[in-house]
């Protein structure tokens, strides 16, 4: 499928009256699209419900900072082990089966995390939570690619926007419940129940398509999938850098006070959500190539502004430009993974998800070592140069 083929055939002026192209959208696909949106929202919601609970869980098991850091690695380790398996299972059984099984398994894990009495049991619970949560993440993206293919129009950016909206909602709801004096276990149970309700409603509308029985249990990424995984890793790396190091860069350059340094990431995140909410319409109108090219250049310009801005309003504009620029890259890469024919799409999407998650886990640490050897400004400058690999590879992605 080429770039222009992303547009809906229903928009063709040459379609004869009464043809399939002029009829309304397939009700099954419409239901599936809304169900997929609910899964993205629920996954973002329950993911961010965990963050406000961390101080309470840490105190309960009596872990110090270094021990708790190792515990959080269990969360990432469970995710990295489960994501390739989730892709293989989705290829064999269909994405809906994986979403249902892993989604219903992850729901009770959230309140269980608040009840673990020891470091060892908490580590096991975090590993399972990471495995179930990220299995849903892989499967919902596989399902989204199938829905987008059948709908013959872009929907991926809007889905990722709803994940972000779910994240904001989950963190906010959990923080409010804890501030109101609810016990962490009760607040976690209510948060999990809300996510479960959205997930159960979604399961009724998800597609029941099955994968091929001859799909291998595992396949190393190859060909263009390697390229898509690398480019996705770069995009995730930028997101991780803005989350973990963006505030420190603003403080180091004396652009924002310590108390307000988090404002930069808020601007970045808000720009990302906004760009993703309108991303599908922009891609439908302009095509994927201009969005990748323009987004890359916007992100590079935003990072350059962060490095060189002499005063805070310009720095905040840099955060916004970076957010607008990277917002729709990963959705485009997932869509491209669904179109390629080098390897089964489900396994390709699992490879990309695993690479991206590894980038989120390890990337900030790598940037920290680089900043220690040079400076944060130099490190962000190198990150902007790496981003230029995306426009250089845009044609190979969009011609799939």
Image (cartoon, helix red, strand yellow):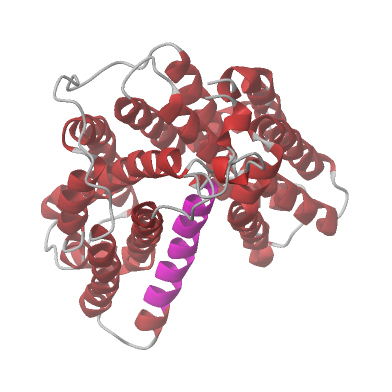
| Percent x, y of residue 370 | 59, 28
349 or 284: nearer the eye?
284
Res. 199 image quadrant: bottom left
Res. 81 image quadrant: top left
Q: Residue at x 22, y 54 (%)?
A: 103
| Number of marks in picture | 0
Q: Is residue 51 left or right of residue 159?
A: left
| Percent x, y of residue 161 | 52, 55
Res. 108 image quadrant: bottom left
In reply to whether residue 189 is colored magenta, the answer given is no
73 or 62: nearer the eye?
73
Q: Residue furthest right?
A: 310
In reply to whether residue 172 is colored magenta, the answer given is yes
Q: Is residue 242 visible?
A: yes
Is 211 above or below relative to 137? above
Q: Is residue 292 left or right of residue 40?
A: right
The span picked out in magenta is 157-175
12 or 250: nearer the eye?
12
Q: Residue furthest front?
A: 17
Is 161 above or below relative to 327? below
| Percent x, y of residue 318 | 76, 48
| Percent x, y of residue 205 | 28, 58
Q: Residue at x 44, y 62 (%)?
A: 167
Is 359 above or below relative to 96? above
Q: Is residue 101 left or right of residue 67?
A: left
Q: Residue at x 47, y 15 (%)?
A: 224
Q: Residue furthest top?
A: 223
60 or 336: nearer the eye?
336
Q: Residue at x 32, y 67 (%)?
A: 53
Q: Is residue 254 visible?
A: no
């Amino acid at each position: 499928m080429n770039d222009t083929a992303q547009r809906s055939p229903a928009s063709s002026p040459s379609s004869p009256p009464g043809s399939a192209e002029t009829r309304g959208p397939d009700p099954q696909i419409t239901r599936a699209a809304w169900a997929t949106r609910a899964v993205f929202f629920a996954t973002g919601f329950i993911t961010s419900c965990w963050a406000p609970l961390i101080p309470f869980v840490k105190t309960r098991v009596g872990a110090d900072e270094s021990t708790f850091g190792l515990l959080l690695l269990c969360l990432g380790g469970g995710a990295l082990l489960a994501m390739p398996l989730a892709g293989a299972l989705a290829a064999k059984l269909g994405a809906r089966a994986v979403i249902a099984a892993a989604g219903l398994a992850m729901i009770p894990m959230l309140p269980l995390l608040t009840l673990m009495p020891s470091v060892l049991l908490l580590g096991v619970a975090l590993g399972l939570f990471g495995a179930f949560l990220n299995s849903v993440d892989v499967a919902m993206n596989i399902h989204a690619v199938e829905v987008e293919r059948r709908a013959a129009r872009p929907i991926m950016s809007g889905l990722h926007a709803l994940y972000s909206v779910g994240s904001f909602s989950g963190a906010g709801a959990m923080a409010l419940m804890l501030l109101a004096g609810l016990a962490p276990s009760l607040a976690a149970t209510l948060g999990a129940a809300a996510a479960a309700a959205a997930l159960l409603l979604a399961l009724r509308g998800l597609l029941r398509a099955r994968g091929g029985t001859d799909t291998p249990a595992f396949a190393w990424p190859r060909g263009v999938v390697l390229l898509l995984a690398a480019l996705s890793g770069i995009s995730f790396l930028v997101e991780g850098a803005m989350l973990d190091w963006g505030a420190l860069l603003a403080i180091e350059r004396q652009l924002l006070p310590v108390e307000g340094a988090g404002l930069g990431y808020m601007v970045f995140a808000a720009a990302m959500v906004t760009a993703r909410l309108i991303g599908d319409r922009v891609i439908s109108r302009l095509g994927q190539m201009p969005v990748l090219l323009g987004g890359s250049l916007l992100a590079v310009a935003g990072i350059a502004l962060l490095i060189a801005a002499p005063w805070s309003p310009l720095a905040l504009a840099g955060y916004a430009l970076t957010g607008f620029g990277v917002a729709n890259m990963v959705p485009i890469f997932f869509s491209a993974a669904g179109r390629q024919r080098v390897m089964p799409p489900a396994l390709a999407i699992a490879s990309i998800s695993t690479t991206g998650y590894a980038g989120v886990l390890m990337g900030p640490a790598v940037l920290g070592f680089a900043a220690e050897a040079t400076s944060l400004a130099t490190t962000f400058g190198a990150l902007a140069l790496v981003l230029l690999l995306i426009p250089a590879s845009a044609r190979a992605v969009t011609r799939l």
